[in-house]
Amino acid sequence: MLSANHVEEIKLFLEQQSASALVREQRKARELLLGAATPNPADSGRLKHFARLRERLSPEAELFWPNEVQREIYGNDSGTHILPALVKKMFARIRVNGVVRPACLDDARAFVQWALENGQSYTVRGAGTWPFGGAVPMNDDWLLDLSLLDFLKLDPRHELLIFGAGALFPGIREFLAEKEFALKQEITNPNSGTLAGWIVTGGLGLGSYKYGPVRDSVKMLLVLRPDATLAALTPDDEDFDAFFASEGQAGIVLGGALSVRPQSYVSKPYAFSFETTAAVNEYRTLLREHGLRPTSVIYFDRAYIRETLTIERRHLNAYAERTLQNDDPGRLAEMRARRAALDELEGCAHVLVLNFDSHADYQAALKTRLFGAADTDMRIGRLTFHQLSTALAHQLWEHRFLPVRMKQNGPSMLVSETLLPEEAFVPYQKLLRHLLQRLMNIDLKTEAHFLSNGSILIQSIVLADIRTV
């Protein structure tokens, strides 16, 4: 629990940060490349309205009407860009009025105050990586782009990361690694996404089995309410929980403080193959009964494994061709090892992957009957399963960051997320697989993350042509 003084220090740090230096560099580069920007004559009737907003913002805040290319960028996110133009035209009116990129927290507050006074609606956008349209402006919304608020500070004494709304996961990982710290929880997409955006969309993913959802690690949020007031919230505040999975409806998360951990440099992945989803669930029950603490428990169903195998074999064949041309003995050995791992994967059915990030946790696991020697058939009562080789376990653990790789087997990739109690997992899977196969002749692929509270986050993946599905 943070003290009132500590909360105020964090709030003050975030309020004092500015992207002014970065903005000046970007403007100088644009002017050298394109010359000085001039207003679009077609927008001259709105210049007065535009100027009044400009007066409220700092000189470094970016305020502009998007050109055609920018409208295409801001009119899509990582999922909606695949929708046919006709579908968008029929069911949505995707239009942006103007774009505001605050250079500091006070710019964001000033814009929200202006929008409130002038009856203007707006959409909040971070990295634009949420795949379900949450960052896409509708009906002439203004677009509040928070990407410049990329502020980070580590408090090593309290093991806290102080972050701004624009801080991306790749930058956060690099920033923490340089100081020998690491995140407790993170998203499965390693190259994009903001921490603040992940918080407002629920914050479930890697690390959630041991450390819980990201809500358990957030010690403070600095939020901008719809009435343009700033509030520093801690877990003891009544409104704190309203901002998790709120999609920004409760207000804007401008920053906060997140509990992080010293880098342990320990990664002990294990993987097992089961013949049925019910057997996976039984093993998961045993994990909890033994009080074991893997960071993550990830499930891949048979169809997911089959699709992954197809992709990996194609990549390996291309790698093998390059290796043979170069006659590199080191790469030849690596190629044989990768081929052996894929041959092993071909015999897998439903796969469960676990990882331990501390010596104490994985040593406790080895003292149970749930773990044995690599590449071994195992039995606990009526439960039978196969522990996979160490090499394949590492390969499957690395695959946690590659779920979107399946898109290349398209032509399109549709994904839905469902949060269910663990006891509903088996009947849910049976029903969904049966319906999709019978009604649409589509094989469902499933990746799922077991959570510490007895829930499971299910990602249902369909490869199909969205024009005909």
Image (cartoon, rainbow, N blue to C red):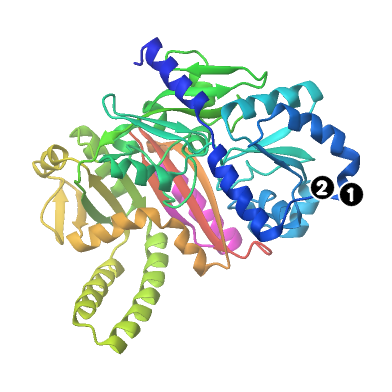
Mark 1 burial class by Cα count in 10 Å: few <14, some 14-19, many 20+: few
For the residue marked with disc 1, what is the amino acid? Ala
The stretch of residues the image draws in magenta is 425-446
Q: Which mark is residue 359?
A: none
Is 428 inside the magenta-drawn segment?
yes
Q: CA distance from mark 1 to mark 2?
A: 9 Å
Mark 2 burial class by Cα count in 10 Å: few <14, some 14-19, many 20+: few
Residue at the spot x=62%, y=51% of the render?
Answer: 28
Decide if residue 404 is in sight here: yes
Query: Left or right: 34 with respect to 208?
Result: right
- Residue 340's spot in the image, x, y percent? 22, 73
For the residue marked with disc 2, what is the amino acid? Pro
Q: Secondary structure at mark 1?
A: helix
Residue at the spot x=63%, y=48% of the render?
Answer: 27
Query: Left or right: 170 with respect to 442?
Result: left
Q: Which residue is mark 2?
A: 39
Kindly give the residue lying farthest to the top in the view shown: 4
Above or below, 109 relative to 8: below
* Quarter of the figure with residue 342: bottom left
- Residue 383's spot in the image, x, y percent? 21, 49
**Camera-side residue: 133 or 445?**
133
Q: Which residue is mark 1?
A: 42
